[in-house]
Amino acid sequence: MLLVRSIGICFLLLAAGLGAAPSATGAETWWIPPVDAPIVDPFRPPASRYGPGNRGLEYGTSGGEAVWAVADGTVTYVGSIGGSRFVVVSHPDGLRSTYAYLQDWQVVRGQRLVQGQRLGTAGPGFHLTARLGEEYIDPELLFGGAEVVVRLVASGSREPGGYTRAAGQLIGRK
C-alpha cells in the first residue's frame, strides 16, 4: 500500500507542477525562500507516519527577520499552537505552506497574498513546511524552477495482470 501511495504522490506532485502555477502570462511561478537566512536543518522525511525527522526546513534566524509569502495564496490559518505562532497559506496549485515560530504576523485569515508579500516576522529558529494534501514535501524542491528529477524503482512484486509495481522517489532538481 505504501508503494502505491508513493507512486500516487509522485504523480500528484508532477500534476501539481511542484509549486509551479501558471501566471497570467503563462509562465511558471516558483516558490521563493521565506526569509533571508541560511537553512540549518534540511528536510528529512520520517521513515513512518509518526517517526522522527524534519518535515520542513529550519532556518537560522535570530528573530526579527522579515517573513515573505513563498507564492501567491490565501491565508487559511493565523494563530498560536502550543505557545508558538503559525500562519498557513493555501496556494492555487493545491499546495499549502506553513510558517512556524513567528515573532508576530501581519496577516488575517482569508487575506490574499502575492509572492514576496510580508506576512510577519521570524522568531529564533523559523520553520517552513510544504504539504500536498496530508503529505509533506521538501520545500527546497519548490524553489527555483529547475528540471524535476523522478526515479522509479521496481519493487519486484507483481500486480494482477503481470505488471511489476514501482515506487516513485522524488530526488530533486537538476
Image (tube, rainbow, N blue to C red):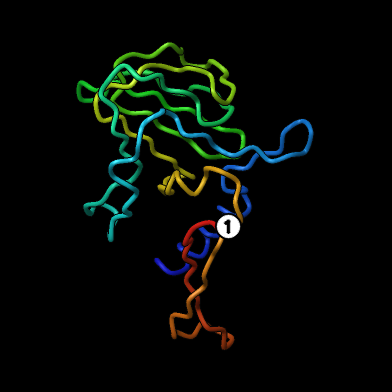
Q: Is residue 77 above or below residue 16?
A: above
Residue at (20, 21) in percent of width and height: 83
Image location (x, y in percent) of residue 134: 42, 45
Q: Residue at x 42, y 22 (%)?
A: 67
- Left or right for 171, reference 147: left
Q: Quadrant of residue 125?
A: top left
Q: In the image shown, does 169 or 25 lie closer to the viewer?
A: 25
Considering depth in this image, is 61 or 29 the residue closer to the camera? 61
Q: Which residue is mark 1?
A: 148
User: Is 5 above or below relative to 129?
Assistant: below
The residue lying furthest to the right in this view is 25
Q: Is residue 112 left or right of residue 136?
A: right
Mark 1: which secondary structure?
Answer: strand
Name the image quarter holding the C terminus: bottom right
The front one of 166 and 169 is 169
Image position, residue 102 (x, y; %): 31, 21
Give the amino acid at mark 1: Val
Quarter residue 100 falls in? top left
Crowd class of label 1 (few under 14; some 14 to 19; many from 20; radius 10 Å) = some
Q: Is residue 99 shown left or right of residue 21?
A: left
The quadrant the N terminus occupies is bottom left
- Residue 141 rendering spot, x and y as whole percentages: 49, 49
Residue 122 image position (x, y, % from top left): 33, 21
Residue 69 vs residue 153, the one in the foreground: 69
Compared to residue 97, the image places residue 2 above or below, namely below
| Vertical order, 71 against 20 (above or below) | above
Kindly identify the residue that appears in the image at 35 percent across and 43 percent down. Answer: 56
